[in-house]
Image (tube, helix red, strand yellow):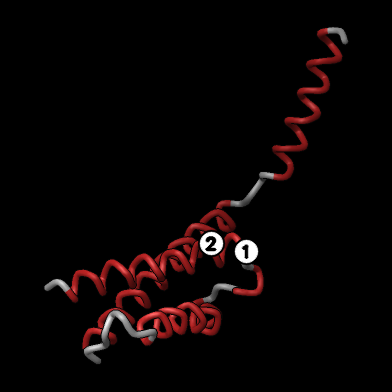
Amino acid sequence: MSNGAKSAAKSNVSSKKSALNKDTPEEKHKRYIDGIKKTLLPLLLGVLSAVALFDLRADPAETLGLLVMFLAILVQKYIYPYLGVDPDGFGGKDWFYISFMTFAFWFVSWTILLNW
């Protein structure tokens, strides 16, 4: 392949990529705000579920703690529409992120409270 053909192929590929990645500033801002909401809600629900379990004096060996944590993950599907985020557009990767963040904040918060 000649240098001219290579550069033409590269410019064709780069123009397709740039056409796909052209977002308006408003779309970028909305994605940014949605990302913040996807992080803050699991943080809040993870910490709140840990505080609720601590107030209930739940035994860490019982399954109540996991039940409350899974409930905190499930309820997010119904809270996101009120925050202006469409949960139907979430993929498996998004739900894994939300579940992991909720679990991590629940686990760390509950561990701190239990050792306090």
Q: Quadrant of the C terminus?
A: bottom left
The residue located at (45%, 64%) in the rendering is 100
- Residue 104: x and y in percent read 36, 65
- Residue 40: x and y in percent read 39, 68
The residue located at (37%, 77%) in the rendering is 45
Q: Which residue is mark 2?
A: 30
Q: Is residue 14 left or right of residue 77?
A: right
Q: Quadrant of the N terminus?
A: top right
Q: Residue furthest top?
A: 2
The residue located at (81%, 15%) in the rendering is 6
Dot 2 falls on a residue whose secondary structure is helix
Q: Quadrant of residue 13?
A: top right
Q: Which residue is mark 1?
A: 92
- In the foreground, 29 or 102: 102
The residue located at (48%, 61%) in the rendering is 35
Q: Quadrant of residue 46?
A: bottom left
Q: Is residue 44 left or right of residue 74?
A: left
Residue 116, compared with residue 96, is above or below; it is: below
Residue 20, compared with residue 75, is above or below; it is: above
Q: Which mark is residue 72?
A: none
Dot 1 falls on a residue whose secondary structure is helix
Callout 2–callout 1 Cβ contact below 8 Å: no
- Residue 78: x and y in percent read 54, 84
Q: Estimate the spatial distance between the alpha carbons at disc 2 and disc 1, rounded to whole Å.
A: 21 Å
Q: Quadrant of residue 85?
A: bottom right
- In the foreground, 19 or 59: 59
Q: Amino acid at mark 2?
A: Lys
Q: Residue furthest bottom?
A: 56
Disc 2 packing (10 Å; few <14; some 14–19; many ≥20): some
